[in-house]
Image (tube, rainbow, N blue to C red):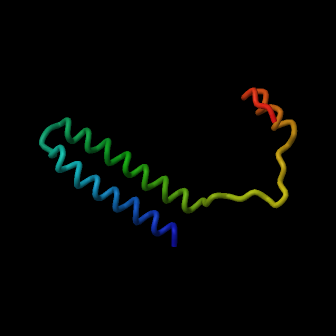
């Protein structure tokens, strides 16, 4: 249900921003068409990534999973982190 709600929300934001964009900058010049095309491609990418993320899901970590000490030490050395 949350996936459908997210897709609905992103779609509604997309439709409203397209409507507001055409009110803000009417499609009368070449610059407005270029800007509108770039805006539509960004909006499409947002919707597409949201749908793909819903299909893939968040993933999981097995129960009692621990990070490998060598990997942990590598990250601490790169970040100068202290445990």
Q: Nearer the viewer, residue 10 or 40?
A: 10
Farthest residue toward the front? Answer: 83
Is residue 52 rendered to the left or right of residue 35?
Answer: right
Farthest residue toward the right? Answer: 69
Farthest residue toward the bottom? Answer: 1
Residue 75, quarter of picture: top right
Residue 30, quarter of picture: top left
Where residue 65 appears, as percent x and y from the top left, is: 83, 54
Q: Nearer the viewer, residue 44 or 74?
A: 74
Farthest residue toward the left? Answer: 28
Where residue 17 appears, as percent x and y from the top left, is: 29, 53
Q: Nearer the viewer, residue 57 or 67?
A: 67
Number of numbered discs overlaid on the protein picture: 0
Where residue 35 appears, as percent x and y from the top left, is: 26, 39
Whether 62 is drawn above or below 27: the answer is below
Is residue 70 rendered to the left or right of residue 12?
Answer: right
Residue depicted at x 28% and y 44%? 37
Is residue 4 rendered to the left or right of residue 23?
Answer: right
Residue depicted at x 23% and y 52%? 20
Where residue 2 appears, as percent x and y from the top left, is: 51, 68
Is residue 82 rendered to the left or right of residue 28?
Answer: right
Residue depicted at x 81% and y 37%? 72
Whether 82 is drawn above or below 22: the answer is above
Whether 22 is drawn above or below 2: the answer is above
Quarter of the picture holding the C terminus: top right
Residue depicted at x 78% and y 27%? 77
């Amino acid at each position: 249900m949350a996936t459908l709600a997210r897709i609905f929300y992103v779609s509604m934001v997309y439709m409203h921003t397209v409507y507001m964009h055409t009110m803000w900058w009417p499609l009368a010049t070449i610059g407005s068409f270029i800007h509108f095309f770039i805006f539509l491609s960004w909006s499409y990418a947002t919707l597409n990534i949201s749908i793909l993320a819903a299909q893939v899901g968040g993933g999981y970590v097995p129960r009692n999973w621990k990070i490998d000490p060598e990997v942990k030490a590598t990250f601490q050395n790169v970040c100068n982190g202290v445990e």
